[in-house]
Image (cartoon, rainbow, N blue to C red):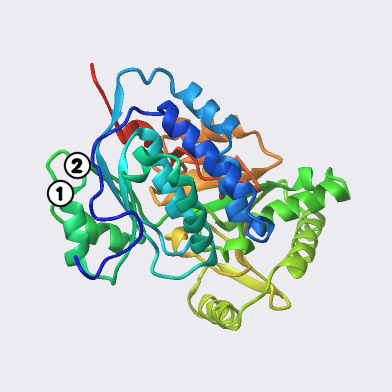
């Protein structure tokens, strides 16, 4: 395949599975963490720092211990990854999850160029030299958007990790694979946040600043592009004072850290105009400069998951009770972040109502914390096989 650029590895990739969470794999991931941590500019890239933190010895040891016995477990073989184009470091997490399961991998890197990808690949090349068994099972590739090449990789895959929009997932799932190939698909999802207004009033200024920083990391940091980034903010025990304190703190944080691109500013304004013309449940849109748009809803009706903003455009609604939410949740819903709520009660709400959506309930600030359980999949288990 002459159009394929092998950024790491070669077409002569070894497709021999390794033991799940093998000592070699764990040592390699820990070594990668050390090299990423020592990268001089790591603080400029919080997502690279988060990757390094996730790879640390303590976390990998915890994941292995939580997994239980791996004595009779192997990877499935070769995993083909189609990485998402909107989150720079997800390609690395996707590959690491498959590696921990014991798989070789071919990872198609995002077409969009991000400095994080170059940084991670440069560090990774050095880390792999000390682990030849993993090096010969690793290939990161780039190629033009051609289904012919993707089809070739799909034909040899024992598992596929497909990240992207619904269209991308459908298109790639239509390509021929081995009969036993396992697909994990990460299609379009929708996320929301529930905030207890009384808890906001009970929080001191330092706590409020931390909350605003966490909310920024969930939203503005990725321009709300991530599936786990909340689009709809639900208020319980609501009051104007609570909302004012929260949004004022969020605005201060965004003013200090966020650089609004012209295209995003135009997109936000256009979204506001479209909502004003077409959104029947819209009460009004409050603008705080160009950084923050808040579209107030008078009801939760229709396909809520179509209400999406970017760069600081949020929908808000005063929730009367959680039953109101149960009526609109579909399988599109992924992450529910919360502040001032009881997480077990929220998980219980999902279970009791047998909702088809909401796979995660996490505190504000942890929306982006990708892990081996994601989108409702226990990834390492699904990418490995048991010898009974």
Q: Residue at x 78, y 50 (%)?
A: 210
Q: Quadrant of residue 149?
A: bottom left
Q: Quadrant of residue 5?
A: bottom left
Left or right, 44 with respect to 147, comes to: right
Q: Residue at x 28, y 55 (%)?
A: 10
Q: Nearer the viewer, residue 332 or 29?
A: 29
Q: Residue at x 51, y 65 (%)?
A: 308
Instruction: Answer whether residue 288 is visible to the viewer in this image.
Output: yes
Residue 355: horizontal and vertical position, in percent? Answer: 42, 39
Left or right, 372 with respect to 171, comes to: right
The correct choice, above or below, for 65 with respect to 295 in the image is above
Residue 86: horizontal and vertical position, in percent? Answer: 46, 64
Left or right, 276 with respect to 20, comes to: right
Secondary element at tag 1: loop
Residue 76: horizontal and vertical position, in percent? Answer: 25, 35
Q: Quadrant of the C terminus?
A: top left
Circle 2/circle 1 CB separation < 8 Å: yes
Give the residue pinned by disc 2: 181
Inter-mark Cα distance, 2 to 1: 6 Å
Category of crowding for the residue at label 2, using alpha-carbon neighbours closer than 10 angstroms: few (below 14), some (14–19), many (at least 20)? some
Left or right, 86 with respect to 183, comes to: right
Q: Nearer the viewer, residue 246 or 162?
A: 162
Instruction: Answer whether residue 98 is visible to the viewer in this image.
Output: no
The correct choice, above or below, for 139 with respect to 276 in the image is above
Q: Residue at x 74, y 50 (%)?
A: 211
The correct choice, above or below, for 247 with respect to 271 in the image is above
Give the residue pinned by disc 1: 177
Q: Quadrant of the N terminus?
A: bottom left
């Amino acid at each position: 395949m002459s159009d394929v650029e092998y950024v790491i590895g070669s077409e002569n990739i070894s497709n021999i599975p390794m033991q799940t969470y093998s000592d070699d794999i764990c040592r390699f991931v820990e070594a990668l963490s050390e090299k990423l941590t020592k990268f001089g500019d790591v603080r400029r890239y919080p997502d690279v720092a988060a990757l390094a933190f996730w790879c640390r010895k303590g976390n990998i040891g915890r994941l292995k211990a939580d997994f239980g016995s791996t004595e009779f477990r192997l990877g499935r073989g070769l995993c083909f990854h189609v990485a998402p184009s909107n989150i720079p470091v997800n390609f690395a997490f996707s590959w690491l999850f498959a590696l921990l399961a014991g798989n070789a991998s071919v990872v198609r890197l995002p077409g969009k160029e991000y400095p994080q990808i170059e940084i991670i690949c440069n560090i990774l090349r050095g880390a792999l030299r000390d682990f030849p068994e993993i090096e010969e099972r690793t290939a990161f590739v780039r190629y033009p958007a051609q289904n012919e090449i993707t089809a070739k990789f799909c034909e040899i895959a024992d598992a596929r990790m497909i990240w992207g929009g619904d269209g991308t997932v459908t298109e790639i799932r239509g390509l021929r694979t081995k009969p036993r190939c396992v697909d994990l698909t990460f299609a379009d999802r929708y996320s929301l946040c529930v905030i207890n207004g009384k808890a906001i009033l009970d929080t001191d200024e330092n706590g409020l600043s931390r909350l605003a920083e966490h909310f920024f990391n969930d939203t503005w940091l990725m321009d709300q592009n991530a599936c786990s980034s909340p689009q709809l903010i639900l208020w319980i025990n609501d009051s104007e004072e609570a909302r004012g304190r929260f949004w004022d703190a969020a605005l201060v944080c965004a003013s200090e850290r966020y650089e609004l691109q012209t295209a995003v500013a135009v997109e936000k304004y256009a979204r506001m105009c479209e909502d004003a013309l077409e959104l029947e449940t819209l009460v009004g849109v409050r603008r705080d400069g160009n950084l923050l748009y808040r579209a107030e809803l008078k009801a939760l009706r229709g396909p809520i998951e179509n209400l999406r903003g970017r760069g600081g455009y949020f929908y808000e609604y005063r929730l009367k009770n959680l039953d109101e939410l149960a009526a609109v949740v579909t399988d599109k819903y992924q992450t529910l972040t919360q502040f001032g709520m009881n997480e077990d009660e929220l998980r219980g709400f999902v279970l009791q109502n047998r909702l088809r959506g909401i796979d995660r309930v996490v505190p504000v600030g942890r929306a982006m914390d990708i892990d081996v359980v994601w989108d409702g999949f226990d990834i390492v288990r699904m990418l490995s096989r048991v010898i009974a």
